[in-house]
Amino acid sequence: MSADEVHQTGLDEVERIRGRMHEVMKEVGFEGTLEEFMQHLKDDPQFYLDKKDDFMALYNNTCKEIDQLMPKYFKTLPKMEYVIKEMPPEMAETAPGAFYNAGSLEGRPGIFYINTLGFEKKPTYDCPALCLHEAVPGHHHQGSLGIEQTNLPAFRRYVEDRHYYEVPSRFALYGAYMEGWGLYSEFLGEEMKVYKTPYDLFGRFSAEIFRACRCVVDTGMHVKGWTRQQAVDYITNNAGLPDREIQSEVDRYITWPGQACSYKIGEIKIKELRKKAETELGDKFDLKEFHDAVLLESAVPMSILEKLVDQYINSHK
């Protein structure tokens, strides 16, 4: 894809997701603009917790509920376990709301880190999408399955143990695959009925529109001559994130061109491949088998993923 195509994809996705946000507003009976609804959610105390222990318990309980749903949607489940921990204070100031560290076959579990800095201002409806993306069926599920494929060489399995800054001196990380899968997992959460309230669903759309905004502002700054402030304003007007987080994110895009676009572009490709398999296989399509086809070769470039899905389709016709 060209930078212009990525930019337009972002604009189109922002418009589509805003439409779904308006559906939530209608469902809960809110009358006003989307911006007014976002402000209403920020001001409503029912969506915020006063105790850090309650905040962490929310994430633990949500992940446990998702764990129970996994066998219905996935044929192969990783043996590796994961734990949920509070992010170390020295990392919290500049870190995102959550992130995942891979486990190992030697017994180290995967770790889903939660950033509790300013938890009093972090809405509870953001929790389901974060758990789906970072833990299961997102990064923990995907990364652990890759590590456990002992038929693959080590450099193919231990992708998560390498660092972004080592590229291109080491084998590249396949961001569109890994982050695209994380965002696809948030999408799959609707099918899994993880989002129990309209507000939970709005939290998902808030996370998704943020990823779409990244495609717009990254290409805007690096190709179309946008200023830093234009990027900040665009995210502020469409994603409704805290200003501190927006400032940090825009600095990330300035120093790391293209990476932030991988989430949405990868997710779109995975959804396209699923639709292709559903269309060509009809009644023979099996979602669990499709997920195996996507995951059991570990992280790969999207061009290779397309070939893997084609093999799955041809073998099931």
Image: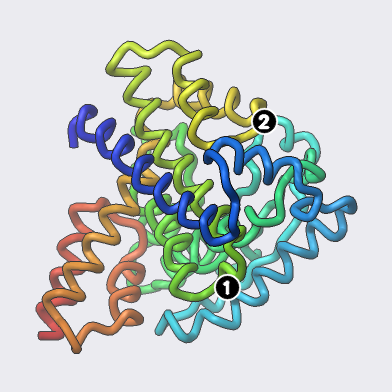
**Residue marked by disc 1:** 80
Q: Return the mark for residue 225.
A: none
The residue lying toward the viewer, choosing from 103 and 244, is: 244
In the image: residue 131, left or right of residue 259: right
Where is residue 289 drawn, in percent x and y?
Answer: 30, 81
Q: Residue at x 65, y 69 (%)?
A: 63
Sequence-first tag of 2 and 1: 1
The residue lying toward the viewer, choosing from 317 and 301, is: 317
Q: Quadrant of residue 150?
A: bottom left
**Residue marked by disc 2:** 94
Residue 292 vertical placement versus 227 (above, below)? below
Q: Quadrant of residue 202?
A: bottom right
Where is residue 287 drawn, in percent x and y?
Answer: 32, 79
Q: Counting other residues with Cα less than 10 Å from the Cα at mark 1, is it few (<14), some (14-19), or many (20 or more)? A: many
Q: Secondary structure at mark 1?
A: loop
Residue 274 vertical placement versus 37 (above, below)? below
The residue lying toward the viewer, choosing from 221 and 232, is: 232
Where is residue 219 drawn, in percent x and y?
Answer: 32, 25
Q: Quadrant of the C terminus?
A: bottom left
Residue 5 in view (yes/no) = yes
* CA–CA distance in space, label 2 to label 1: 29 Å
Tags 2 and 1 in contact by the CB under 8 Å rule?
no
In the image: residue 133, left or right of residue 196: left
Q: Residue at x 35, y 81 (%)?
A: 288
Residue 88 vertical placement versus 258 (above, below)? below
**Please, what is the three-letter code of the amino acid marked with disc 2?**
Thr
**Please, what is the three-letter code of the amino acid marked with disc 1?**
Met
The outermost residue toward the front is 31
Q: Residue at x 33, y 76 (%)?
A: 292
Q: Residue at x 77, y 46 (%)?
A: 116
The residue lying toward the viewer, choosing from 122 and 314, is: 122
